[in-house]
Amino acid sequence: MAIDVFWRIPTHGEPSSLRNKLHHRGDWSQQEGDHIVHKGLSGGHGDGFTNLDYIAEVARAAEISGFQGGLIPSFPMTDEPWAISSFLARETSTFRFMIAFQPGFLNPVVAARMTASLQRATRGRALFNVITGGGGPAQLWWGDVAPHDDRYARTTEFLDVLRGVWSGNSFSYQGKFYQVENAALPAQLLGQDFPEIYFSGSSDAALASASKHAEYYLSWLEPFDQLRDKFDRVKERTAALGRKIKCAVRVDIIARRTEEEAWREVRRGFENLDDAARERYKRFAQQTGDSVGASRQRSTAPKELNDYRDFIIHPNVWSGLSLLRGGQTQGIIGSYEQVAERLDDLVRLGADAFILASTPHLEEAYRVGEEVLPLVRGHDSAPALRAVG
């Protein structure tokens, strides 16, 4: 069985590196020095290079470096994934767009039509990362007040309707959250491949919804024993419904020629933390919400910021990445060989796919594609990565 590997597209902008966070051409806002052509060579004028140009460069780098495609994330501080996917469709040839979205904010019939159009235009390069929200202030930002389990019930109904409309027959549905009568796609949009679904969520309600609809159950990196247990539970639930599901891990990595070089990146980033980052960590440690996944991430984090080594929870696994760039806490740090070995460890406990990331995403897409992916063996000794295209 082949392993699928995706890259993450930094639609929120990004600094020059995790160790010093200097402004660079990948950031959202344009400043002096962001341009590719030096002012001395351009007559004192900028060259018009924008953050969108940078995102396209990252996607093309991932495409030619062996990644299947990229996750287009959805957060309050990112570009809108559906719009960015349409933009990237013209910039790439085989790159697949993993569109992250919360079903509660879309009408499922509209989502079916949007997706079918994108599939037709790109010859089937779209797939979904279905997220259902972490609760608390983060969910209120979107104006969503639905309780935790209701959000997953709503996600399940949304996917019921989307699949029903996609079937090509006149479709009616009477649920708690959605009611449609004789809905259908236009004839010109029928027959497109239904997008694979990567489903995120760690609660029992999430696992129940994933078991019904997802092709891949997607988890952040967690302590390996916890991850094995989670994968086993979702596979058991899915088997009880007469379906099979694959599992995937979303994880940041720092891979260098030697392990010492990789940890040096971490140490320098930790030593350069400013007061604002330290204050954010205090809030993170005290954060509340109904996201089971976020709670599991916080459970392995030290209460105090003393030494970067306090965050090492497993060989080559560091739980302090949110200090350096926000988001999930746990990542893989090591030499090219060690990072590949840890990915193979995850394959052995049930992973069938990965979404990888590293900062800056452009240069790191080339590095990981050239130095790490060829070392991943997957399920056996044969070439493990599924070919692009």
Image (spheres, grey):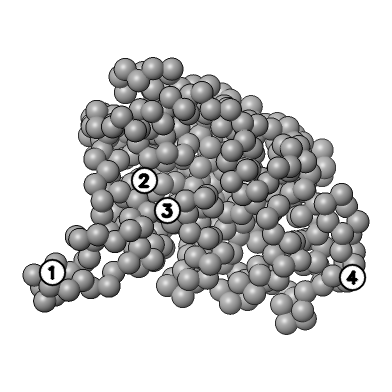
Residue wearing tag 3: 12
Q: Which residue is denoted by mark 2 in the rendering? A: 358
Q: Nearer the viewer, mark 4 or mark 2?
A: 4
Q: Sequence order check: which comes first, mark 4 or mark 3?
A: 3
Q: Residues within 10 Å of mark 2 (few under 14, many from 20)?
A: many
Q: Identify the residue at image location x=46%, y=22%.
A: 301
Residue type, mark 4 in image: Asn
Q: Is residue 166 visible?
A: yes
Q: Is residue 386 visible?
A: no
Residue 69 appears at what percent x and percent y? 48, 59
Disc marking residue 39: 1
Q: Amino acid at mark 3?
A: His
Residue at 35% over, 28% down: 278
Q: Nearer the viewer, mark 1 or mark 2?
A: 1
Left or right of residue 176, residue 53 in this image: left
Q: Relative to residue 124, is residue 316 drawn left or right? A: left
Please state which amino acid type lies under the numbered disc 2.
Ser
**Residue projecting furthest to the left:** 40
Q: Residue at x 84, y 70 (%)?
A: 183
Q: Earlier in the sequence, mark 1 or mark 4?
A: 1
State the mark number for residue 182: 4
Quarter of the figure with residue 181: bottom right
